[in-house]
Amino acid sequence: MKKHILLTVLGGFLAFNYTNAQVTYAKPEEFKEIKKRTLIVQMLEEHPDDIADMQKKIDKEKKADKKAELEAELKAARAFVTDYNKYMKEAVEKHWGLNAKVEYKTVSEVAALRKSKSTNYTVLFYSESSSQRRDANGFRYFPELSIPTLNYSRIESGTVKVDYSYFIQFAGFRSEGGFRMADAVMSLKMMKNHIAEIEKQSKKNYTFKEYAEDQAKANCSQAKGKTVKMSRNSVHKKSTEDELRQDYTVGK
């Protein structure tokens, strides 16, 4: 079974879209109009038929370890839907603020509006983006890796060539499971800051990677003399504490 970062059990289970992430197609001046529209926050939804199919696979599985694995995957996928909807709604209400009017609709409801060719909405929606990483010979590696992505785009732009997309940077480790409030808040704040900088500098196709690099250059001096705290889980297992102290002390 193909495994993605978010334990996508079945292709249609969460009604995912696959997008070209981290590419901003909207022009800097277009964000003004995008922000004036009513924002639809797309809520994830389960597909009953897919859940039933997955449950049949679990019921037919004879091996206890495999059955437990399938049950855990189904539980994780269903929990992700619940957690994403809950925390994204809370985070948008408390931390977004770019659009004055906000509505919440399911994937099915948004799909119907897309078909109507409406031009009144901007949509904030979740998708998974296929990995585009390539080696020195041009071959893709991690071809089955799907990257969790938030998209902010005019409804008529569709789900592929979106106005703005952002790779979700999870606040916790995926082994800890679920989608958390911190994931939603951090993502939305990062998106707001990036979009503001796109407008300020009037840079087209200004990726988040470029934005982060520029911000690092501007802010590194502010870290001088301060204590750096990091989780051991985020550091390569072969890195020693002495090496880390040396690197961060001398500013390498």
Image (spheres, rainbow, N blue to C red):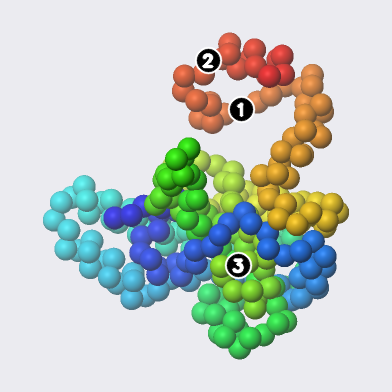
Q: Secondary structure at mark 1?
A: loop
Task: Tell me the CA gap for discs 2 and 3.
Answer: 44 Å
Whether 134 is drawn above or below 236: the answer is: below
Q: Of marks 1 and 2, which one's residue comes earlier in the chain?
A: 1
- Is residue 235 something that shows in the picture? yes
Q: Which numbered tag is attached to residue 122? A: none
Horizontally, residue 163 falls left or right of residue 197, namely: left
Residue 45, percent across and down? 48, 71
Q: Badge 3: how crowded within 10 Å, few (<14), some, or many (20+)? A: some
Q: Secondary structure at mark 2?
A: loop
Report the label total: 3
| Label 2 vs label 3, nearer the camera | 3
Whether 182 is drawn above or below 87: the answer is: above
Q: Which residue is painted at 16% across and 63% down in the image?
A: 60
- Is residue 124 something that shows in the picture? no
Residue 248, percent across and down? 68, 19
